[in-house]
Image (spheres, grey):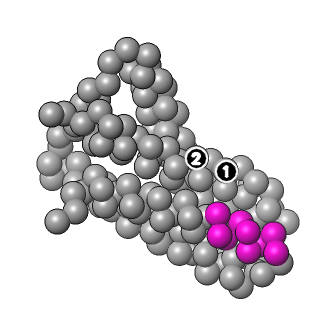
Amino acid sequence: MISNAALNACLNGLSGVLLACGYASIRAGKKNVHKVFMLSAVAVSLLFLISYLTYHIRVGKAVLFQGQGWIRPAYFSLLTSHTILAAAIVPLIIVTLRRAWLKRFDKHRLIARWTLPLWFYVSVTGVIIYFMVYQIYAPR
């Protein structure tokens, strides 16, 4: 059975892949394909958020990072940036989606230039954090 942390890492990773595909499709001028990828990324990210919050509300425990030496401040720097941007990205995603929904594509593009790289960063760093905590420096 897959752990909740592994499920969340998979959802984060899938979101990142969908974002990259969405970006590639809009660059290729495939607007409908872009729309499908981006809405899929939103759905997967929403599943992640529900899974993450449900787990932490029910269980409430966190696995402590076990790494020592130079990796410890590197990990906490990554975790801090990930956490701050994960909170900030939610309203950015909502505004970006709303502008697309209302067909205000000029304004959509302006904010999407910020939303996409930040959202991608949050997705990728979520997977990295999972590997650092649960695989590489896992409690033994």
Q: Residue 53, image x and y in percent?
A: 29, 54
Residue drawn at x 59%, y 59% as measured from the top left: 93
Q: Which residues are magenta?
A: 20-28
Residue drawn at x 32%, y 18% as measured from the top left: 68
Measured Cα–Cα span from mark 2 to mark 1? 6 Å
- Residue at label 1? 117
Magenta stretch contains residue 75:
no
Q: Are marks 2 and 1 in contact (CB under 8 Å)?
A: yes
Residue type of the residue flagged with mark 2: Tyr
Q: Residue 85, image x and y in percent?
A: 54, 41
Q: In the rendered image, is residue 70 in sight?
A: yes
Q: Residue 98, image x and y in percent?
A: 65, 68
Vertical position of residue 7 compared to residue 114: above or below: below
Residue type of the residue flagged with mark 1: Pro
- Residue at label 2? 121
The answer to whether 67 appears left or right of 103 in the picture is: left
The answer to whether 48 appears left or right of 3 in the picture is: right
Q: Residue 69, image x and y in percent?
A: 37, 14
